[in-house]
Amino acid sequence: MEKKCLDCGDTIRGRTDKKFCSDQCRNNYNNRLNRDSNNYVRNVHGLLRKNRRILSDLYSEKMIRVHKDALFALGYNFSFFTHIIENSGGQKFHYCFEYGYRETGDDFLELSMNSQYLEYQ
């Protein structure tokens, strides 16, 4: 019985349990199979990187207090962040990797940097 490659349909030579005729066909098949989930992860990671860059730029410019609309104008997406930390005073900080903010209640945000991330470098 002649086995066919799952990607290109060519005849497979070699071991009886092979599914692909070459590494290229194996990669093509698996990339096509995982395309949707890989695209989703790539898009979310891109949004997180963009949010981090915006917070990093503002923080490095010593802008510790920023109006929420200013972040919107820069393209910040408030739906995407990596984690939330609540301090002992009950204040919640939304972080995008090591840069974060807390809402002050008057449409302003107080920016901060979590120094714990520097330990992982």
Image (cartoon, rainbow, N blue to C red):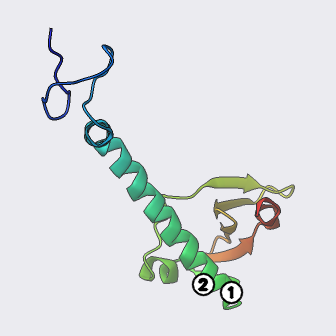
Q: Secondary structure at mark 2?
A: helix
Q: Nearer the viewer, residue 110 or 77?
A: 77
Rounded to the nearest angstrom, the CA distance separating label 1 from label 2 is: 5 Å
Which residue is label 1 attached to?
60
**Image x and y of residue 20, in percent:** 26, 29
Residue type pointed to by label 2: Asp
Asked whether disc 1 touches disc 2, contact meaning CB atoms under 8 Å apart, the reply is yes
Question: On the rendered image, what quadrant is the N terminus found in?
Answer: top left
Horizontal relation, residue 39 to residue 104: left or right = left
- Does residue 107 appear anywhere in the picture? no
> In the displayed image of the protein, which residue is found farthest to the top?
1
Residue sitting at x 65%, y 62%: 97
The residue furthest bottom is 61
Which residue is more in the foreground, 48 or 88?
Answer: 48
User: Which residue lies at the image location 81% right of the left edge and 61% below the top edge?
Assistant: 116
Residue 94 sits above or below residue 15 on the image = below
Residue kind at label 1, given as amino acid type: Ser
User: Mark on residue 57?
Assistant: 2
Q: Is residue 116 left or right of residue 51?
A: right
- Residue 81 image position (x, y, % from top left): 56, 58
**Does 27 appear above or below 109?**
above
| Residue 53 against residue 32 in the figure, above or below | below
SS of the residue at dot 1? helix
